[in-house]
Amino acid sequence: MTEPNPNAPSHSAEDAALGPPVAVPGRGLRQNMGEGAALLEELRTAIRRFVVLPSDEALTAAALWVAATHIQPALQHAPRLAVVGPVKRCGKSRLLDVLTETVHKPLITVNTSPAVVFRAIGKQPPTLLVDEANTIFGSAKAADKHEELRGLLNAGHQRNRPVLRIAGPEHTPTSFSTFAMAALAGIGDLPDTVMDRAVVIRMRRRAPGEKVQQFRSRRDIPDLHRLRDRLAAWLEPLLDEAAECIPQMPVTDRAADTWEPLVMVADMAGGTWPEQARTACKSMTAYEAEQDDDATFKVRLLADIQQIFARHGDPATLPTRDLLGALCQDAEAPWADYGTAGLTPRHLGLLLKDFGIASRTLRFDGGQRQAKGFARSQFADAWQRYCAPEPEPASNG
């Protein structure tokens, strides 16, 4: 049976649910829009036609990430795109199919070795696309086996982080570039160090009412390639402009490094894209920060201790016994149920260890009693770094 033409007009309810067809030149979508903004909108439409993403922000991020691959020579950081889902059949591989046909110079693999990857990157890096990444990193045994690949992916997030290997018959030390944008799809989270350098899209299975069009290579790839070529034609002349661009970011530190190329593309596109990009950046990075359960738990402990000192009038010291009692009395806090018998002095010490805070023997009751406890000054630096409200980033002006 002949496959229906995705660009043919249709008035069925199912076709309406699929949204507009993949945009091609001459369809009028770019009317009243700048070239870049219109192309990004077409890209969003193309992705949405074949896969259901978890949110509009995720769809925006995917489109901007694809576009950013076309300005890799101008970038300081090469963000990873982590396409993860809890189980099979969440659309991860289908999204990778669409990305493969729209990114710059795709190099897709299911399983590979670090030697192949860094030799494939070279001076004109491809866009790496790795499916079934859980088979590489999904178990402790597999992760240990592929530790070198994880290190390569981490190093390649930033420009000028080469690897040195012995190569050739003369066994000459040779520098290999690692810098390249990469998308990795798999079941479950990737290693923390990779996720920390990634724009994370958390896929989920389609609900009964969510419809997509089946992806057919012979029919759909030519349209996607035309869209890819038009993206390249728009962005490649802007490489010098992109290299000089330092966009105002709504986040800081590594999250800003990772999202900067996406926001940069949005700013060059204009229209509503700068606002959409920053909204996606803020909401998606905030969500991922909450997923780091261990770090969130420890910061919660710092904040609760800060409140306890405040309720006691900010004394110079507090006994460990009193601090634990106050923590476990809070019915809405997790401390009374921590472990098998609630938070203990040992648990407290382990949770605070990473902040450089440990109990010590102090004098209380005017020096009449000695007991284990904490000085308020021990927490000052950690409170300032982890509990103080973050300053509002400068707005995009």
Image: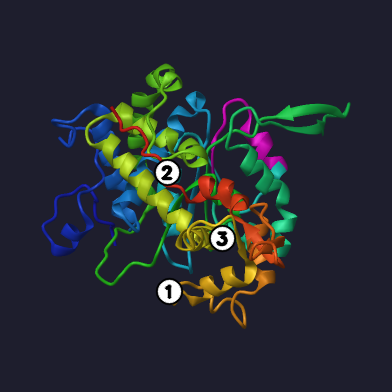
Q: In the current view of this chain or complex, which residue is farthest to the right? A: 170
In what element is the residue under mark 1?
loop
**Whole-percent x and y of residue 116?**
69, 41
Answer yes or no: do the residues labelled 1 and 3 have beta carbons within 8 Å? no
Q: Upstream in the sequence, badge 2 or badge 1?
A: 1
Q: Residues within 10 Å of mark 3 (few under 14, many from 20)?
A: some
Q: Upstream in the sequence, badge 1 or badge 3?
A: 3
Relative placement, left or right, of 321 versus 80 is right
Q: Which residues are magenta?
A: 115-129
Which of the 4 quarters of the picture holds residue 29? top left
Relative placement, left or right, of 261 versus 6 is right
Q: Upstream in the sequence, badge 2 or badge 3?
A: 3
Residue carrying label 3: 298
Q: CA distance from mark 2 to mark 3?
A: 18 Å
Q: Tell me the kind of residue under disc 1.
A: Glu
Say which of 377 and 249 sits in front: 377
Which quadrant, please, contains the N terminus? bottom left
User: Which residue is at a point 33% across and 40% down the rendered structure image?
Assistant: 278
Say which of 293 and 172 sits in front: 293
Residue carrying label 1: 332
Q: Tell me the kind of residue under disc 2.
A: Glu
**Whole-percent x and y of residue 186?**
53, 59
In what element is the residue under mark 2?
loop
Which quadrant, please, contains the C terminus? top left
**Whole-percent x and y of residue 37?**
25, 33
User: Which residue is at a point 29% across and 60% down the rendered structure image?
Assistant: 212
